[in-house]
Amino acid sequence: MNSSIFPNFWRFLGLILGQGLLLKQAVQTVGSAYFNVILYPIFILLLPVQLAAPYLVLLGFAVGISVDMFYQTPGVHASAGAFAGFIRGLVFAAFAPKGGFNAKDPIFAPQYVSWQTFLSVSGVFFFLFLFWYHSVEAFTFVYFASIVLKTVSSWSVTMIFVILYAALFNPKQ
């Protein structure tokens, strides 16, 4: 148990600081409403596979509210983070092998599952997360076309960063 706490704690801090200090500045520099990189949900994706859903929702809320402090968007990222914790189990179930994911696979990383499975699951996970995030940000479905356009464009850019993160940081724990 202790062996999985420290890597996740450092991942939590690193992703919050990276999102709040680096990626926020990159988005502001580009200045486009459709260029939005949101990488912190990978923290939820890379938590232990066997972690119970209530803990995922609480940790998703914690990472989201921490990012909200950088963005001055009270509750938007917290809502999206909690949603990410909720849907992770559903997405995993949709892509799980016949017997489910093995307890021998401590986290959902390409080193334990194939790159194809990792990209499929993270693609669906991030698409649902970004759709929720942009829906909560707009706070109405009147702008449905804009929400979908922002979701697709954000998803395209975010997935590049997810692949880079998984390849560079090699999350084995």
Image (cartoon, rainbow, N blue to C red):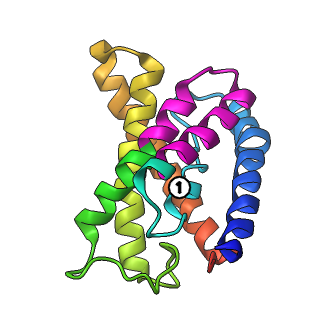
User: As displayed, is residue 142 above or below residue 169?
Assistant: above
Residue 100 lies in magenta, yes or no? no
Relative image position of residue 152 (x, y in whole percent): 38, 42
Q: Which residue has dot 1 on it?
A: 44
Q: Residue at x 35, y 58 (%)?
A: 89
Dominant secondary structure of the magenta stretch? helix
Q: Residue at x 58, y 44 (%)?
A: 38
Residue 63 lies in magenta, yes or no? yes
Label 1 residue SS: helix
Q: Residue furthest front?
A: 1
Closer to the camera, 136 or 89? 89
Relative image position of residue 169 (x, y in whole percent): 69, 73
Relative image position of residue 64 (x, y in whole percent): 60, 37
Q: Quadrant of the C terminus?
A: bottom right
Closer to the camera, 157 or 66? 66
The answer to whether 2 appears left or right of 129 in the picture is: right
User: As displayed, is residue 43 above or below residue 48?
Assistant: above
Q: Residue at x 67, y 63 (%)?
A: 8
Closer to the camera, 102 or 147? 102
Q: Residue furthest left?
A: 98
Q: Which residues are magenta?
A: 56-83
- For residue 67, what is the image quadrant? top right
Q: Count of labels shown?
A: 1
Q: Quadrant of the N terminus?
A: bottom right
Mark 1 nearby-residue class (10 Å; few <14, some 14–19, many ≥20): many
